[in-house]
Image (tube, helix red, strand yellow):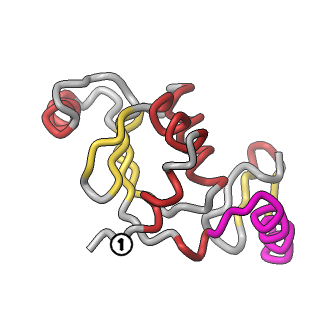
Amino acid sequence: MAIAIVLSPNLSFPRYNIKIKKKEFKMFDFLNSLFGRHPEKVKANVEIYTWQTCPYCIRAKLLLWWKRVKFTEYKIDGDEAAREKMAQRANGRKTVPQIFINNNHIGGCDDIYSLDTKGQLDPLLAQSGS
């Protein structure tokens, strides 16, 4: 449970009585080096459209969190205008999540995991989003 979220130095989840302190980041650094992950190389602009309780959205965000990717999340629960905007960007796809890296449509949860499995995700994340 301690590896769940790594976005800021001190995280707290009082509902679950979980606290992640800055010193525990050394463990993440160790795990990243063990698995050959290099969060310092992530330069991409990542955007993800989600619903709050969608299990596929949560799974996709967990992969991004594990890689320590900073991303912009658009929670579109019940917002039809936002869903239409997402569909326009995603070539008509209306399911969530929809993920964009440097304004390029990647796809959904299965697509991002497939890219990671093939070793194609990290190079995408290393490209600058400017």
Image x and y of residue 118, in percent: 56, 41
- 22 or 128, nearer to the observer: 128
* Residue 126 located within the stretch drawn in magenta: no
State the residue position of label 1: 128
Identify which amino acid the numbered label 1 is placed on.
Ser
Question: Could you tell me how many numbered marks the image carries?
Answer: 1
Image x and y of residue 79, in percent: 24, 31
* Residue 34 located within the stretch drawn in magenta: yes
Vertical relation: 21 (above or below) 123: below
Residue pictured at 79% horizontal, 63% vertical:
20
- 38 or 16, nearer to the observer: 38
Image x and y of residue 99, in percent: 37, 42
Vertical relation: 54 (above or below) 26: above
Q: Quadrant of residue 130?
A: bottom left
Q: Quadrant of residue 34?
A: bottom right
- 52 or 97, nearer to the observer: 97
Image x and y of residue 42, in percent: 51, 69
Q: Residues within 10 Å of mark 1 (few under 14, many from 20)?
A: few
In what element is the residue under mark 1?
loop
Q: Which residues are magenta?
A: 21-38
78 vs 57, left or right, is: left
Residue pictured at 26% horizontal, 49% vertical:
104
Quarter of the figure that contains the N terminus? top right
